[in-house]
Image (cartoon, grey):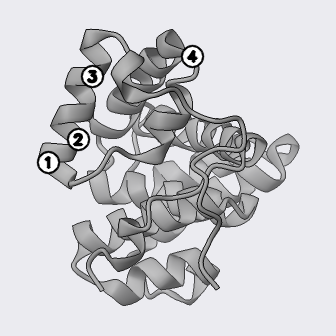
Amino acid sequence: MPQPDHISALGVPDAATLDDDLQAIWAKCVEKLGFVPNVYATYSLRPQRLRNFMAMYNEVMLAPSGLSKLEREMVAVVVSAANRCYYCLVAHGAAVRHLSGDPELGEMLVMNYRVAKLPARQRAMLDYAWKLTTTLHLVDEADRDALRAHGLTNEDIFDLSEVVAFFNLSNRMAAATDMMPNRAYHRTDR
């Protein structure tokens, strides 16, 4: 049985009614990806929030960091697994498959990251992401020290924490709007 056909339970504006800058982004997405990510369509209900969301995503996920793009996507998947966020598990699971070239890694992270044979640094990062998502009140200096022991700097820990926080926000917005992932993500890099 296929997923529901809607993009968001709150509806999305007609792309033709969006401001010129957003229509240009839509065109670029279609050119580059073949589709507009449904998260953009959902956020277009509030155009300035969409701009803010894209700026934050670009900063958190793409700006220079001691964390690789793949590591940040891995964190996105583990946070989304903890939150059971369908949209982000599908979309960012696809990104992990694409960036790693390993379809099994994406599936392991979606289902249970602990079964993946990962370098100690990445395991420590994902353990921290899980803890910060599921029991944030228990995060303490020992957790930061564990990350430092695996070579993360204070800046890296900040970046890691920000990725975790961003995807906790994104997961909650996806759940609140009943956002559905683009079907193309299901087929990516399988």
**Which residue in the protein does label 3 denote?**
23
Q: Are marks 2 and 4 in contact (CB under 8 Å)?
A: no
Q: Are marks 1 and 2 in contact (CB under 8 Å)?
A: yes
**Element type at mark 2:** helix
**Element type at mark 1:** helix
Answer yes or no: is residue 25 visible. Answer: yes
Q: CA distance from mark 2 to mark 3?
A: 10 Å
Q: How many other residues sit within 10 Å of disc 4, few (<14), some (14-19) or many (≥20)?
A: few
How many numbered marks are there? 4
Q: CA distance from mark 2 to mark 4?
A: 19 Å
The amino acid marked with disc number 2 is Cys
From the viewer's perspective, is the residue at label 2 or at label 3 nearer? Answer: 3
**Which residue in the protein does label 1 denote?**
32
Q: Are marks 1 and 4 in contact (CB under 8 Å)?
A: no
Q: Give the residue drawn at x 42%, y 75%.
A: 186
Vertical placement of residue 44 versus 185, above or below: above
Q: Give the residue drawn at x 33%, y 48%.
A: 67
**Element type at mark 4:** loop
Q: Which mark is residue 65?
A: none
Residue 32 x, y percent position in the rendering: 14, 48
**Which residue in the protein does label 2 denote?**
29
Quarter of the figure that contains the C terminus: bottom left
**Element type at mark 3:** helix
The amino acid marked with disc number 4 is Arg
Q: Is residue 153 left or right of residue 88?
A: left
Q: CA distance from mark 1 to mark 4?
A: 24 Å
Q: How many other residues sit within 10 Å of disc 2, few (<14), some (14-19) or many (≥20)?
A: some
Sequence-first disc among 1 and 4: 1
Residue 79 x, y percent position in the rendering: 63, 56
The amino acid marked with disc number 1 is Lys
**Which residue in the protein does label 4 denote?**
46
Q: Nearer the viewer, residue 21 or 151?
A: 21
